[in-house]
Image: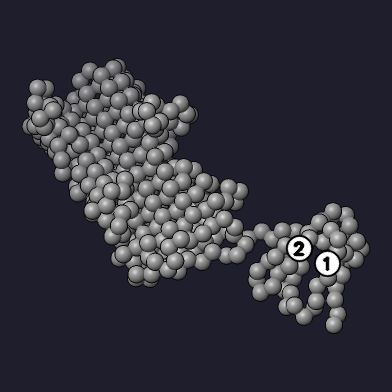
Amino acid sequence: MKKILLSTIFTLASAAMFAQSVYICKGGDYTKADITEGLEIKLTEGIDSITFYEPQFEKVVTIAYNGTSATVTIPSFISGVTCSSGTSADVVLTSTNTKDEITYKVSGTSTNGSLVINGEYKMTVELNGVSLTSQKGGAIDIKCGKRIAIVMAEGSTNTLVDAANGSQKACLYSKGHIELSGAGTLNVTGNANHAIATKEYFQVKKSVKAINIEKAANDAIHVGQYFQMNGGELNITKTTANDGIQVDYKTDDFGKIIEDEDNTGEVLIKGGTLNITIDANEDSKGIKTEGDIIISGGTFNINANSNGSRGMQADGDMVINEDDNTTNITINAAGGKCTLIDDKSDPHKCMGIKIDGDMTVNAGTISVIQTGEKTKGIKVGGRYTNNGGTVNASVEE
């Protein structure tokens, strides 16, 4: 039987490479072999190829849902990723990999399924026409405090629904920060709490087609650090119980604000279309942030229909310009006075925009249509400055 002595091959053909190992492919799977002391391989072993360099593969784990089951495929060359849920449709994956970014490709349909991913390293989650309705908790729960890239396959429609009796923070939740991209559509229903929530920032890229928040028992989108939208379409319906978009500063376990360059508490809108209707509960806001609101493009259609509601509210400042795209803001203020017990001594009114700090308008068009009883247009706690924008609303300083 013929054999190959790899120590000879290495000496004659590849001495300049200083390689100490080879990678042997059999049936599509690679194994690493040490050749420091020489290595013999039988030609009858069914070898596809031999290379001195570590092959570079796309590190992809696939999750395919089918009714009450799911098929999880973890290639042998991916180390540190395990599935503890077997073929159950409630998939639980854990990654101990802190070197390579893993991509999790999710597809299929389950009316009794969910996805939990535990990890300590950034990852990509690709949604390719997935429809998940959880009966236990959140539909997708990513327990990783790093960057989570959620990519929607082009033309795909992805639907997530959580359990109404669960204790989850959101239907779609991430312990880290989410960067959403891809020319697909995402439909989210939050039956128990928020529809989408992240402990850190949430970014919507230009490539996104549409995000539809079809229901939220609390806020539609609730994030820490900041919210940024560069394009696409965001639709938040009237079945949202509290705020449309709420941004808080990220805090530690003792409630202290964490000092970090990303922890700005800002809402940054650079483009796209936002359609937000708030009328389920009193004292709700279309957009609410603990920091600043900075708008440099986008089309806003906000309906603040409940008592004491606000179209936009910032604890900090507001700056409006058109540096990135045309800015057109229309807010319908149709609510009345807030009647909640906490506000009985000083009931506040429905208004289009409320800014505790300064408001500066450099460009764009802002219109507040006041149809509610004794509603207000714009209220600014600090200084109001208009450097060239069109403001069709009463302004109170």
Mark number for residue 33?
2
Q: Using residue 100 as the reference point, say whether residue 397 is left or right of it.
A: left
Percent across and percent down for residue 311 are 23, 35
Could you tell me which secondary element the residue under label 1 belongs to? loop
Residue 250 or residue 42, whichever sits in front: 42
From mark 1 to mark 2, how far is it between C-alphas?
8 Å
Quadrant placement of the C terminus: top left
Task: Count residues near mark 2 (Cα–Cα under 10 Å), then give few for <14, some for 14-19, many for 20+.
Answer: some
Three-letter code for the amino acid on which mark 1 is drawn: Leu
- Residue 129 sits in which quadrant? bottom left
Q: In which quarter of the image is the N terminus?
A: bottom right
SS type, badge 2? strand
Q: In this view, does 338 lie to the left or right of 392?
A: left
Residue picked out by circle 1? 39
Which residue type carries mark 2? Answer: Ala
Q: Earlier in the sequence, mark 1 or mark 2?
A: 2
